[in-house]
Amino acid sequence: MIKDRNFLYITFADLVVRSAYQMGKTPLLPIFAAMLGATDILLGFIVSVSTITGMLLKPLVGLLSDRWGRRSWLLVGTAFFGFIPFLYWLIETPDHLVIVRIIHGTATAIYG
C-alpha cells in the first residue's frame, strides 16, 4: 500500500488532466479541424502533429530536467499544459490549429 498521500494526490490530478485532454481531443479535434476547412490530409497532420512534437522533444526535455531539476520543469509543464487549451478559442484557420497543436505537443513533452 502506498503511504505517501502526496503521491496519490499527484497521481489522481494527473489522471484527471490527461483524461480531460483525451476526452476533448479525440472526438472533437477532427470535427473542429473540418469546420475550419482542413483537407483530409491536413486533418491527419493536425491530429498527429502534437504527438510527433511531443515524441521529438521528450528526450531533450528529459535531459534538461535532469540538469536543471525536475520540480521546476514539472511546474512549468503543468502551467503550460493547463494554459494551452485556452488558445483553441483564438483559432480561425487550419494553420492556426497546426501551430497550437505544435505548442500543445511541446507542453505535453514538458508535462509528461
Image: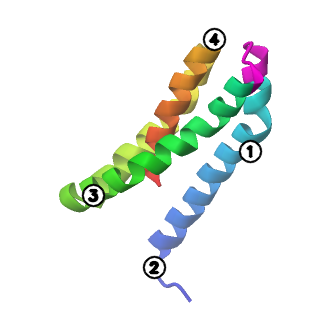
Toward the viewer: 41 or 87?
41
Question: Residue 36 appears at what percent x and percent y?
Answer: 72, 14
Give the Cα separation between the discs numbered 3 and 2. 27 Å
Give the Cα separation between the discs numbered 1 and 4. 22 Å
Q: Which residue is mark 4?
A: 93
Question: Residue 108 appears at what percent x and percent y?
Answer: 49, 46
Question: Residue 44 appears at what percent x and percent y?
Answer: 70, 33
First of labels 1, 4 by sequence position: 1
Q: Which mark is residue 23?
A: 1
Q: Which mark is residue 63?
A: 3
First of labels 1, 2 by sequence position: 2
Give the Cα separation between the discs numbered 4 and 2. 46 Å
The residue carrying pointer 3 sits among few (fewer than 14), some (14 to 19) or many (20 or more) residues within 10 Å by Cα, namely few
Q: Which mark is residue 4?
A: 2
Residue at the limit of the structure toward the left, as seen here: 67
First of labels 4, 3 by sequence position: 3
Count of residue discs: 4
Is residue 110 visible in the rendered image? The answer is no
Q: Which residues are magenta?
A: 33-40
Q: Which mark is residue 73?
A: none
Element under disc 3: helix
The stretch drawn in magenta includes residue 34: yes
The residue carrying pointer 2 sits among few (fewer than 14), some (14 to 19) or many (20 or more) residues within 10 Å by Cα, namely few
Give, as a three-letter code, the residue at label 2. Asp
Give, as a three-letter code, the residue at label 4. Thr
- Mark 4 and 2 residues: CB-CB less than 8 Å, in contact? no
